[in-house]
């Protein structure tokens, strides 16, 4: 894909036409859109939401889709030439629905997907990591399984990821953070002040890898 390539989604069928890529020269900009392509799974149920991240040579679409019983997280990569086969990336045997999807990509095409998923009693923040070739196993990243909401993720320029979320402590919501170095997760740390009801965190990195929440 060229530097000025554009990729996006046509929402004419509610997410369900993925726009193929139109490419242009370095200076001329994108010339045209390609043909729309449906990228979700036609034999599955209704879509609940979607996210798209785009890098220099790749893109990743992740969406929530019901199987008629539960809502799961699905992903499909565009490798610069074609869309690969879609795959389920959440904890497939969880009794509750996935929701509140978030997605981040680094400069090398590695992707972090985050979502909230219920176990029937409480809810947790789950994560899955795409290493540039394959998705790993889904992993619970919040402690205590106690009504977590609003996961957010981002990468620094070194390929390290940071995840934030709001978690109920019995009376108020706290914001928690956890770092992923591409191999393992560090400890979860509460970063919001005590006594404050902290909801809907946001996250960004500067050019030196320092994070602001």
Image (spheres, rainbow, N blue to C red):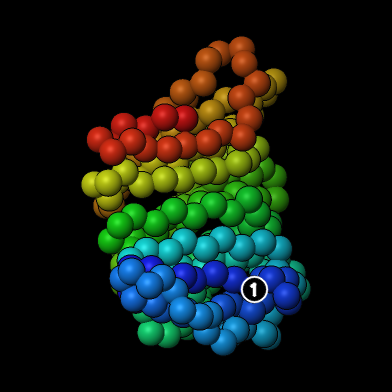
Between 63 and 21, the one lying in front of the other is: 21
Residue 66 visible in the snapshot? no
Q: Position of residue 6 (x, y in %)?
A: 46, 70
Q: Which residue is mark 1?
A: 10
202 over 117 or under it: above or below? above
Residue 9 visible in the snapshot? yes
Q: Position of residue 55 (x, y in %)?
A: 37, 63
Q: Position of residue 82 (x, y in %)?
A: 42, 85
Kindly give the residue lying farthest to the front in the view shown. Answer: 28
Q: Look at the image and tell me in which quarter the N terminus lies.
A: bottom left
Q: Secondary structure at mark 1?
A: strand
Question: Measuring 69% from the left and 45% from the top, which residue is drawn there?
Answer: 121
The number of callouts visible is: 1
Res 73 quadrant in image = bottom right
Q: Is residue 90 left or right of residue 64?
A: left
Count neighbours of disc 1 (C-alpha within 10 A) and say few if under 14, some if 14 to 19, many if 20 or more: some
Between 28 and 4, the one lying in front of the other is: 28
């Amino acid at each position: 894909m060229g530097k000025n390539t554009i990729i996006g989604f046509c929402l004419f069928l509610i997410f369900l036409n993925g726009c193929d890529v139109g490419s242009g020269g370095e200076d001329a900009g994108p010339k045209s859109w390609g043909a729309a392509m449906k990228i979700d799974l036609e034999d599955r149920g209704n879509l609940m939401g979607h996210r798209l991240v785009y890098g220099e040579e790749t893109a990743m679409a992740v969406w929530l889709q019901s199987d008629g019983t539960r809502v799961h997280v699905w992903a499909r990569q565009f490798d610069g030439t074609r869309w690969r086969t879609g795959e389920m990336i959440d904890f497939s045997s969880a009794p509750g629905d996935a929701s509140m999807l978030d997605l981040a990509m680094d400069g090398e095409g590695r992707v972090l997907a985050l979502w909230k998923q219920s176990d029937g009693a409480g809810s947790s923040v789950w994560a899955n990591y795409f290493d540039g070739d394959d998705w790993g196993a889904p992993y619970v990243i919040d402690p205590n399984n106690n009504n977590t909401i609003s996961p957010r993720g981002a990468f620094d320029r070194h390929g390290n990821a940071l995840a934030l979320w709001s978690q109920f402590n019995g009376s108020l919501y706290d914001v928690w953070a956890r770092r992923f170095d591409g191999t393992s997760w560090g400890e979860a740390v509460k970063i919001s002040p005590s006594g404050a009801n902290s909801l809907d965190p946001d996250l960004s990195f500067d050019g030196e890898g320092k994070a602001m929440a």
